[in-house]
Image: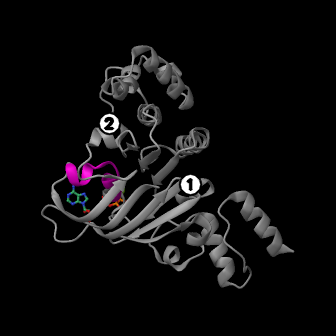
Amino acid sequence: MDLIRFENFFYRYKGNEEYALNNINLKIEKEDNFILLCGETGSGKTTLIKCMNGLIPQFYSGFYKGSVFINEKNTVDTSIANLSTEVGIVFQNPENQLIAMNVEHEIAFGLENLGIPRKEIAQKIEESASLTEIEHLLDKAPFELSGGEQQRVAIASILVLEPKILILDEPTALLDPKMARKIIRLLKEIQLERKITILISEHRLDLLLPFADQMILMKNGRVIEHNSLEMVINGENFQNLNLNKPIIYSIFMKLKEENLFEGKIPTSIPEAVNSLKSVLK
Ligand SMILES: Nc1ncnc2c1ncn2[C@@H]1O[C@H](COP(=O)(O)OP(=O)(O)OP(=O)(O)O)[C@@H](O)[C@H]1O
Ligand SMILES: [Mg+2]
């Protein structure tokens, strides 16, 4: 069974002539562990994500064709509340997502809406706060927190609902490099511990590549490739996209150009070190 499936899906925002999503056929299966969504700015990543919990087409007015299924539920006629038990989404600016008086209430909010008993709520808050390392922030107001702390609270309040897939749209955009690395490491740990699928849209490829298993490439509203990280990184679609390429990628592409390297392009520093050793032999 697919966690998420787009079938011949098109979407155009109201008032726009162009399709923001153009004939999307995409399947995310249970075993697609850590997926990186990447594409040039304006290519449709955020729009694609908005389709993954029914916000499009239910909340945004516009024109659509085709279907999107979340765990076999059609997003046209399943309530967003129901879909949110399958998919948790953290959008780019966590500030807009945090509404409660303090962090504890923030995390409890979704559970209260689902009618979970109080005792169970307390236990789930504890687990989720410990996983995201925010136990010490529970009685603070969201506006008192740093960007990285807010981001972790937003993640905790989604995780507590135990979604099968966690989707994050540029979760590190507002963070410094150190905090960005911390959040991504944390997400990888959560993915392994909870055995869930994580899909991240990110421009910081240097940071993400060592953690990703799969990659989805978008261009002009189309998904142009969805494959294992290794296949995508070594393919022409990735090479031709106008993105901030990872440093390791650029170094090894240069070595290839100079006929100094023939193998697969590495995606992490340890792999790169091994490949360089073979070059220097
Ligand atoms: N609310 C909206 N109303 C009208 N058009 C929109 C809206 N949101 C996005 N668009 C348009 O849809 C297209 C895809 O935008 P989208 O935000 O999905 O791109 P993106 O890949 O997430 O870009 P970025 O990397 O900059 O976040 C763009 O042409 C954009 O201008
Ligand atoms: Mg976006």
Secondary structure of residue under mark 1: loop
Counting other residues with Cα less than 10 Å from the Cα at mark 2, is it few (<14), some (14-19), or many (20 or more)? some
User: Within the magenta stretch, is there residue 197?
Assistant: no
Please provide percent x and percent y for residue 106: 36, 25
Q: Position of residue 257 (x, y in %)?
A: 65, 83
Q: Is residue 70 above or below residue 221?
A: above
Q: Main secondary structure of the magenta part?
A: helix
User: Quick one: 24 or 277, which is closer to the camera?
Assistant: 24
Q: Which residue is mark 1?
A: 31
Residue shown at the point (66%, 71%) measured from the top left: 265
Q: Is residue 171 shown to the viewer in this render?
A: no
Residue at (47% x, 55% y) in the render: 1
Mark 1 neighbour density, 10 Å: few (under 14) some (14–19) many (20 or more): few
Is the CB atom of the residue marked by disc 1 within 8 angstroms of ligand 1's nearest atom?
no
Secondary element under disc 2, as helix, strand or loop, is helix
Quarter of the image where the C terminus is located: bottom right
Residue that numbered label 2 is attached to: 97
Q: Earlier in the sequence, mark 2 or mark 1?
A: 1
**The residue under label 1 is which amino acid type?**
Glu
Quadrant of the rendered image containing residue 278: bottom right
Gap between marks 2 and 1, in whole Å?
A: 29 Å
Asked whether mark 2 lies closer than 8 Å to ligand 2, one says no
Q: Residue at x 72, y 77 (%)?
A: 263
Q: How many marks?
A: 2
Left or right position of 132 against 83: right
The location of residue 126, given as percent across then percent down, is 51, 21
Looking at the rendering, the stretch of residues picked out in magenta corresponds to 48-58
Q: Nearer the viewer, mark 2 or mark 1?
A: 1
Q: Position of residue 45 (x, y in %)?
A: 37, 60
Whether residue 55 is in magenta: the answer is yes
Q: Which residue lies most toward the top here? A: 119
